[in-house]
Image: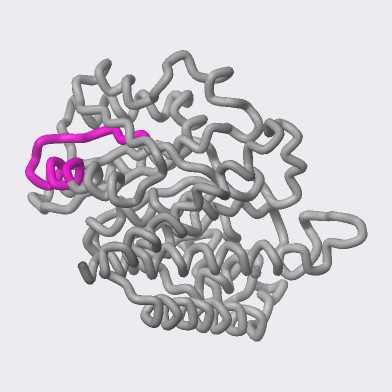
Amino acid sequence: MDNLVTMYRTMCLIRRYEDQLAEIYTEGKTPLFSIAAGTIPGEMHLAAGQEPVAVGVISHLKQDDVVTAPHRPHHFAIAKGVDLRLMTAEIFGRRTGLSRGKGGHMHLFDPQTHFSCSGIVGAGFPPAVGAALAFSRQGRDNVAVAFAGEGAANQGTFHESLNLAALWKVPVVFVIEDNHYAISVPKEQSTAVAHNSDRAQAYGIPGVYVAGNDVLAISEAAEEAINRARQGQGPTLLEIETTRLYGHFQGDAEAYLHAGEKESWRQLDPIARFRSYLLEHHTLSEDEDQTIQREVEERVEDAVKFARESLEPDVGEAYRDVFVES
């Protein structure tokens, strides 16, 4: 039961963090919107609404298991335990960040938690297979998990990685977040199959589709897939239905959405549903929930304060960590 409350706390932390970034991102970008301006430079892809995918899967991982994530990475990073201060400073482009402010929010890299992400669609699949191959060769029981959106499942890297992972029977789990849209293109207009999980059959591995954006159902499916990988039984492909409550990027006009579509998603908010479940089953009390909300707000405020007070990189650092001295 304590694990369920921990999962809920992490989901609340992710949501609070994403909502705070959405607010901060607008600073310095009005009246003329420019992604290069403001407190947070560059694009911003938020994952509010997709918390169950990160928490349901990563709650079954160990510290030294590997996670590769896509360009919408914050929920995965937080669930994996990436330092919130350092990650926020990186997003703000400050020298105290994970990569001294050079990576930004789409290129978070943390060797302490074995977490990485990339702004290139489908780029996380091959490194995850490589990590899993290394675990297998070293005789370790670790696993690698590669997360990506459903649009990435149409990339060559996806199919090449599934093929090699199945052939070598390495301990990797592929997780596709089906949030219905690849940027602005509906899944049915880009993908020849109803569920990407069906594609697992072509590689002789299990494929599981989890509907409903339900953290408990996701957790159950992920536990089975991860245990299977740890036991040397090879990869699994999970496709998880979810919803993003913000646009593809901040500033997205979302003209492609149907009338009332986003409102229907908000009415099914996965955090509100999980909270109701925990209260109904007496796993969480109202007082405990209020304490959690205060705690996550304080953690987010602390991370933002740290980032705001951190210095921007000096111009002289432009070439630092770029070239290797011979």
For residue 310, above or below residue 143: below
Name the residue rendered at 37%, 35% in the picture: 211
Taking the spot 12% from the left edge, 47% from the top edge, the residue there is 230
Using the rendered view, name the quadrant where residue 133 is placed. Answer: top left
- Answer with left or right where residue 229 lies relative to residue 280: left
**Left of 4 or right of it: where is 72?**
right
Q: Quadrant of the C terminus?
A: bottom left
Quadrant of the drawing holding the N terminus: bottom left
Relative to 237, residue 5 above or below:
below
Asked if residue 225 is among those painted magenta in the image, a careful observer would answer yes
- Is 92 rendered above or below residue 42? below
- Could you tell me which residue is drawn at 38 percent across and 70 percent down? 9
Q: Residue at x 65, y 69 (%)?
A: 92
- Quarter residue 59 falls in: bottom left
Residue 202 lies in the magenta stretch? no
Horizontal arrangement in the rendering, residue 193 relative to residue 310 (left or right): left
Image coordinates for residue 60, horizontal then vertical, percent: 23, 56
Residue furthest to the front in view is 280
In the image, the segment drawn in magenta is 224-239
